[in-house]
Image: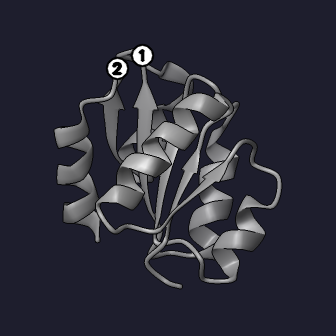
Amino acid sequence: MEKGIVVLDANKKQCQGICSFLDELDYQATPMYSVNNLSEFIREGHCGLLILDLDTIEVDKNLFRKLKRTKPSLSIVGLSSRSFHPELQEAMSSHIYACLSKPLDEEELIFWVKSLF
């Protein structure tokens, strides 16, 4: 399914909450709690949008490059309680479409989901 959403968040309760919210709005959301198998899942065509918690998942610019090589059309939205991520400056400018602040504003999330789908 090309238009699935993956919510990648090590906080299982938060991840499942976001997935449930998206499911209620008829989006197919899949929870993932680590980057293990993420590239394979995306390569198989199960994901059009990745919602990634930057506070709970350790990422670097190489992960974003790998994901975009795997699927150039993949859209990535970050979630974070921090307003600045100097270690992700390159990823923020070239791979991440938006970074939403936490606590998550559901209306803002829906705006980005609708914009990117």
The residue sitting at the front extreme is 24
Residue pictured at 34% horizontal, 20% vertical? 103
**Residue 53 visible at all:** no
Residue 105 horizontal/vertical position (percent): 24, 30
Residue pictured at 82% horizontal, 52% vertical? 36
Residue 114 horizontal/vertical position (percent): 21, 63
**Residue 72 visible at all:** yes
Residue 37 horizontal/vertical position (percent): 81, 61
Query: Which amino acid type is marked by label 2?
Result: Pro
How many numbered callouts?
Answer: 2
User: Which residue is denoted by mark 2 in the rendering?
Assistant: 103
Query: Which amino acid type is marked by label 1?
Result: Ser
Q: Report crowding for label 1: few under 14, some 14 to 19, many 20 or more residues within 10 A (C-alpha).
A: some
Q: Which mark is on residue 81?
A: 1
Element carrying mark 2: loop
The answer to whether 76 is drawn above or below residue 98 in the figure is: below
Q: Is residue 46 left or right of residue 21?
A: right
- Distance, label 2 to label 1, CA atoms, is 7 Å
Residue pictured at 37% horizontal, 67% vertical? 27
The answer to whether 102 is drawn above or below residue 105 in the figure is: above
The answer to whether 74 is drawn above or below residue 85 in the figure is: below
Element carrying mark 1: loop
- Split into 4 quadrants, where in the image is the C terminus? bottom left
